[in-house]
Structure formats: structure tokens, C-alpha cells
Amino acid sequence: MKLLPIRSWVGLCSVVLAGLVASSCQNQNKQEPQHSGGSNNMIEKSQFGKLPEGNAVTQYTLTNKNGIVAKVLDYGAILTELDVPDRTGKKADIVLGFNNLDDYVSKSPFFGATAGRYANRIAKGKFTLDGKEYTLFVNNGPNSLHGGKKGFDKRMWKAEPSESPDGPSVKFTYVSPDGEEGYPGTLTTTCTYTLGNDNSL
């Protein structure tokens, strides 16, 4: 994912476009802190809830050496919180969202989510590739939006937290099988959030 200054962190992260649309969360159940040797960087894991089908969702809290905090979920590769200081040094969460999983599942307008396979609308839910027309799930009037009924924002991603001198990060991976939501071909997608020690996300 492209490094951006904190003030301009909003972007889209998916195969076509990267999706960081705003969101927030306040989960205090922190567990399993992981520290790298000689570094003030930290990654903590905590349970954020369970999906209706029973999958446990994990929230990863990234803290850089300056005390800046970002929180991300392995559900939807969602950015739930980004705490940064204002000009007086007072920290606040600057993204929109929810403080519980149920709201992300039932009513989120793509807050903080990673959109895919395609971010934005595909007119009439159809496209042609190599002379063959594909029909997608229509979920926005006559159009297919952000991957359809169950896009990447509603999938469980494999998470791999890691730390480096540049700051803590989590790499998310999702494998979309051929035919999912009407799209052709099996697609492996990765999205990495890095909270830099230069206060970039």
C-alpha cells in the first residue's frame, strides 16, 4: 500500500483501487502484545466479536514509537481507528465507524473497508472480457457496487503482523475463488497496513 502522510491517509485499497474509507472503534480488550527487540513499536491482538457464522474476528492495534495508534480488523481488512495528535498534541480518533462488529456486519456504508474485487460501480452489473460477458451481483440500483453482495469488505482475511525499523504492520491476504460474485479467475489479493515511525499510514 502506498505510504501517505497521516493527514491524507484516505485512499482506496483493492485489486483495482485501494480502499481506506473512514471508520472508528473503541475496543479495550487488548491481549497478546508483541514487541520487537529494542523498539518502542508494538502490535496487540484482541477479539472484536464473532460473525453470525461463528468466525472470530481479531482487531490488531498498531502503535509506533511516537505513540500513534491504528487499529485494523481481519474482517474486511477494515481500518477501525486512527489516533493522531492535533496541533496542541491532544490525540483523537480521526476516522468514522463503529465500536462493535455487529454494526460493521449489518449496516456499515463501507466505513474503513478494503473494497474488491472492484471498487466503485460497474454499470448494470455487467462487463465484457476477452469477448465474454460476465454478470455480477447487482446491489446498488441497477449496478454492482464494491464487489457485489459479499465483496472483500465482508470477507475474512489471513493476517500476518510484523515489525520493522520503519514501524509495525499487518499484511492481510484474501483468495477470491473463480466465479465469486460473478468475477472470473481465482485472485489472490494482499493489503498491508504499516504505521510508520514517521507517523505515516
Image: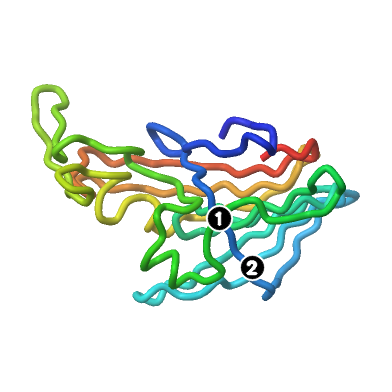
The residue pinned by badge 1 equals 96
- Label located before the other in sequence (2 or 1): 2
Where does the image place residue 26, in percent across and percent down from the top left?
64, 68
Give the numbered dot on residue 26. 2
Q: Gap between marks 2 and 1, in whole Å? A: 11 Å
Give the numbered dot on residue 198. none
Q: Quadrant of residue 3?
A: top right
Where does the image place residue 81, in percent across and percent down from the top left?
63, 56
Q: Give the residue type that dot 2 points to.
A: Gln
Q: Quadrant of the N terminus?
A: top right
Label 1's element? loop
Label 2's element? loop
Where does the image place residue 67, in percent across and percent down from the top left?
82, 52
Q: Give the residue type that dot 1 points to.
A: Leu
**Residue pictured at 49% horizontal, 55% vertical:** 158
Which coloring applies here? Answer: rainbow
Decide: few, some or many residues near mark 2? Use Cα within 10 Å; few <14, some 14-19, many ≥20. some
**Residue pictured at 69% horizontal, 73% vertical:** 28
